[in-house]
Amino acid sequence: MHVFNSLPFFHFCGIILVFLLITLNIKTRQCGIFIMGIWNFIGVVLHETCHLLVGLLLFAGPTGFSLVPQSDGNGKWVMGSVRFRKLNAVNALPVGLAPLFLVAAAFLVYRRWNGWFAPSLGSVLGLYLAIFLLLYESLPSAQDLKVAFNWKSLFLYGFLGTVAFFVWKG
C-alpha cells in the first residue's frame, strides 16, 4: 500500500487541516466584519439555531432571531443572536448552554462518518472539517454564560443538584 493512499496519511492531513482552520479563524478577525461574517456564517447558524430550538422546547418565548453581525456599540461585534421574553430560572441554563448539544452532534458525526462515506482523503478531510465546525461553534459566548448562570438558575440547579446528591448517596 502506498503511504499517500493510507488512512494514517489521511488523518495526518486532517490534523494539518484543523491547524489551518484555527489559523484562518484567527486571521479573519483582522480582516473586518464582512469577511468574519462570511467565514463564521454556517457556525453562527448552528449556534443560534441551538438556542432557538431549546428556547422553543422550554417555552422561553423567542422574540427575535438574527444571523446578521451587529455592533454592540462598544467596538465589538455580535455575530448572531436570539432574544427571549420568558427566560426564567428553569429554562435560562439550558437555553444559554444549548450550543453544547453540538458536542453530541460532533460525536454522532464522528461515530457514523465511515458508514456514510468510504475512507478517502476527501472524506477524512470532510470529517475533520465537520468536527472542527461543530466543536468550535459549541463554545458558549460570554453572553450565553451570563444568561445560563444567572443567580436564580444557579440557586435552583444548585439546590436540585445538592438534593440529588444526598438522595443518591443516602
Image: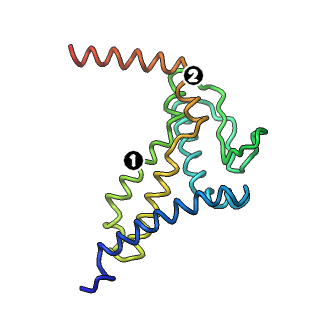
Report the amino acid beneath label 1: Ala
Q: Cβ–Cβ below 8 Å for labels 2 and 1?
A: no
Q: The residue tagged with tag 2: helix, strand or loop?
A: loop
Residue 75 percent across, percent down from the top left? 76, 43
Q: Which mark, by number, is residue 104?
A: 1
Report the amino acid beneath label 2: Asn
Q: Quadrant of residue 43?
A: bottom right
Residue 76 percent across, percent down from the top left? 72, 43
Residue 108 percent across, percent down from the top left? 36, 54
Residue at 48 percent of width and 16 percent of height: 155
Residue most toward the left?
170
Position of 7 relative to 70 (above/below): below
Q: Quadrant of residue 64?
A: top right
Position of 156 relative to 63 (above/below): above
Q: Quadrant of the C terminus?
A: top left
Residue 133 percent across, percent down from the top left? 50, 57
Question: Reading the chain from its start, which is encountered first: label 2 or label 1?
Answer: 2
Q: The residue tagged with tag 1: helix, strand or loop?
A: helix
User: How far apart are the alpha carbons under marks 2 and 1?
Assistant: 25 Å
Side of 66 where 90 appears, left or right = left
Q: Which mark, by number, is residue 88?
A: 2
Q: Which mark, by number, is residue 155?
A: none
Residue most toward the bottom?
2
Residue most toward the right?
73
Local crowd at mark 1 within 10 Å, few (<14), some, or many (≥20)?
A: some
Residue at 40 percent of width and 65 percent of height: 15
Coloration mode:
rainbow
In terms of depth relative to the viewer, which is nearer, 102 or 60?
A: 102
